[in-house]
Amino acid sequence: MIPSSQSRRTFVKNSSLLTGATLLGSVPYARAIGANDRIRIGVIGVGGMGTGHVNSLVSKSEAENIQVVAVSDVYQRRVSRSKEICKGEGYLDYRRLLERKDIDAVLIATPDHWHARLTIEAMDAGKHVYCEKPMTHTVEQAIAVRDAVKKFNKVFQVGPNATANDTYWKAHEAIAAGRLGKVTWAHASYNRNARTCLFNEHQKIDPTAGPDKGGEDFIDWNMWLGHEWDLAPKIPWTPEHFFRFRKYWPYNGGVATDLLYHKLAPLLIAIAGPNGEYPLRVNANGGLYVEKDGRDIPDVFMLTADYPSEWSLFLVSTLTNDAGIPDKIYGKFGTMDLSSAPKLTGNGDFKPEFKEKNEGLEEAILQIKPRRDLENNWIDAMRGNGTVQCNVDLGCSTMVAIKMAVESYRQKKTMLWDAKTEKVVVS
């Protein structure tokens, strides 16, 4: 099994959700949302991403008939900042937000190691949930969240942006119609390169803040770690870990979970469909070649995966050069380039078969249309207007493959997925 900060048994025992007990006591479900009812939203985790969501949701309050009524974070300055933006209430303890019966939905934008617990607690409190990617921090948590969503029957959206791009949905229609022939492999990348690594530049340390400070500078470090619930190890206050959590394994999977989750989820839509597909085998390699500042994560990361419907995947993410490889899907009849306007091109001796499936053309462009962004899509789904772009099944299958890749890199081993037991086996 994958070594992790906790086993699935510990997670389920601590959350007490999947066995019928509740974390918050007898908190009644939020009210049913009518087509014309205002949706009241709370946001948990208001750092850079969370504050962006608060601003975005507030800006569309009138048009979408929504209201951000509360925010929560362990850093008082962030609470005060977002509270001022939304003109709502602010809490250092997220549990006070979840106890509110007037909140219909919760958006979670905390560090990864908190995603699963917050998602399940929020649904147990009767809230619909939007969870930023990655869906969870471990495979075990991903399965637990998937099962909880099905148990509580709440609207649940995961946040990889490209799943709201019509390109991948049209690609799925074309592949399902046989326009590429049998799909056998795909590749994509998400690379960055900056003089100051963006994992540092975008996550600046506030030297005045800490758990021993007062007022706006106070940070509830113990709550952030979550060691009481075995979410991360208990360690002394470490500003580098708090402000730059994406660089450290206890809270994050590095470029794999931060960047490649954005690539894998939409590719799974295109090839496997809206619910994704669990892998058979995953390998990863790479290293920390340039950004040697004490971080855990690599700055060059490459993963390969094989899938049971007989296709293979190659994904790359680096922080050392931003020239990447395009999103492409390869079939027996032709190739699909998704890097701009999705284009299908016939290939080799099978151009006649390609032309037969593509109205006599040797090259075809897929016609795409704008889709609602993930926030608006979530709002629509809560009102019963359609389904979310990244549902829990897609989120879970994406998470399983990504986490298997992280562990393959860390352990220098091949990871296999046992579909019957839903466990990872180290080869």
Image (cartoon, rainbow, N blue to C red):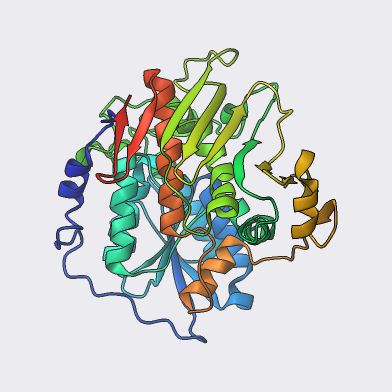
Q: From the viewer's perspective, is residue 196 above or below residue 278? A: above
Residue toward you, 360 or 141: 360
Tell me residue 420's x, y (percent).
27, 46
- x, y (%) of residue 193? 69, 25
- Which one is in front, 152 or 81? 152
188, above or below 141, in the image: above
Q: Residue at coordinates 42% horizontally, 81% vertically from top-left?
A: 33
Q: Is residue 326 left or right of residue 392?
A: right
Residue at image point 35% right, 51% down: 92
Q: Which residue occupies 69% across, 25% down?
A: 194
Left or right: 132, with 143 as reference point: right
Where the N terminus falls, by quadrant? top left
Q: Give coordinates of residue 142: x percent, y percent.
A: 34, 47
* Residue 272 point in image, percent of width and height: 53, 53
Q: How many discs appear?
A: 0
Q: Quadrant of residue 328?
A: top right
Query: On the picture, is 115 further left or further right than 85?
Result: left
Depicted 168 relative to depicted 382: above or below:
above
Q: Is residue 125 visible?
A: no
Image-quadrant location for residue 219 = top left
In this rendering, does residue 306 appear at all? yes
Q: Residue at x 45, y 49 (%)?
A: 277
Image quadrant in which you'd find residue 263: top right
Is the residue 66 above or below the residue 214 in the image?
Answer: below
User: Which part of the image, by quadrant, shows the C terminus?
Assistant: top left
